[in-house]
Image (spheres, grey):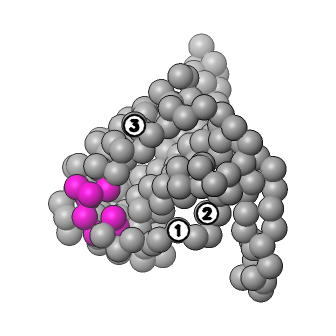
Amino acid sequence: MQLQEAVNSVFLQLKQSIEKLSDREYCNPCVHLNNSTIGQHTRHVIEMFVCLNEGYESGIVNYENRRRDHVIETNKTVAANLLDEIIGSLDKPDKSLLLEGAYSDQSTVKMQFNTNYNREVVYNLEHTIHHMALIRVGLRELNIQQLPESFGVAPATVKHKQTCAQ
C-alpha cells in the first residue's frame, strides 16, 4: 500500500533521528522550540496515530483524548518501538469514520465530522512531517546536522525543488 509505505518512510527517518540522541538530549528542552523537547514532539506524533487506531473499531476518532504518556516523551526506546508498532497496524481497510472534538479551549461541546480512515492516515502523515520540521530545529540546536534532505519537508515540496533544479 503506497500510503503505508509513505508513513513507513517518514517514521524510519524519525526513528533514525531519535536514535542519534542520548536519552538526555531526547528530553532536553529546546530554546528554539519554546522549551518543548524532541521527545514531546515525538510523543505527540505517536499519540495521534494511536488515537486513530483506537477509534477505528468504534468508528469515532477523537485526537483531543490523547493520553499524553510521559514515558513516550522521556524514553526514546519506547518511542522507537511504538513507531514500529504503528507501521504494523496501518494495513486496515478504509472505512467511514467520525472525527470528534470540541476544537476550542472555550467550549466542551463536541462536534462530529464525516471522514474516513485513509484520509486520517494522510492527515497524520502530514502532521508528522510538520512536527519533524520542528524536530529538525531541535536537532540543529543540539548540533545534529546529518539528516536526510527530505526530513520534515512535504513530499510535494521535495518534488517541486527537484523540478526547479532541472
Is 15 located above or below residue 107 in the figure? Answer: above
Residue lying at 35% horizontally and 74% vertically, measured from the top left: 70
Residue 101 visible to the viewer? yes
Q: Position of residue 142 (x, y in %)?
A: 29, 61
- Pinpoint residue 151: horizontal percent, then vertical percent: 44, 41
State the residue position of label 3.
Answer: 88
Residue at mark 1:
66
Name the residue nearer the viewer: 105 or 62: 62
Magenta segment = 72-79
Q: Residues within 10 Å of mark 2 (few under 14, many from 20)?
A: some
Residue 51 lies in quadrant: bottom right
Amino acid type at mark 3: Gly
Residue 66 in percent (x, y) is at: 52, 68
Residue 63: mark in rendering? 2
Residue toward you, 50 or 148: 50
Q: Name the image quarter holding residue 21.
A: bottom left
> Is 36 in front, or is 141?
36
- Binning the other alpha carbons within 10 Å of mark 3 as few (below 14), some (14 to 19) or many (20 upward) gives few
Marks 2/1 in contact by CB < 8 Å: the verdict is: yes
* Secondary element at image label 2: helix
Give SS at disc 1: loop
Where disc 3 sits, the SS reads helix
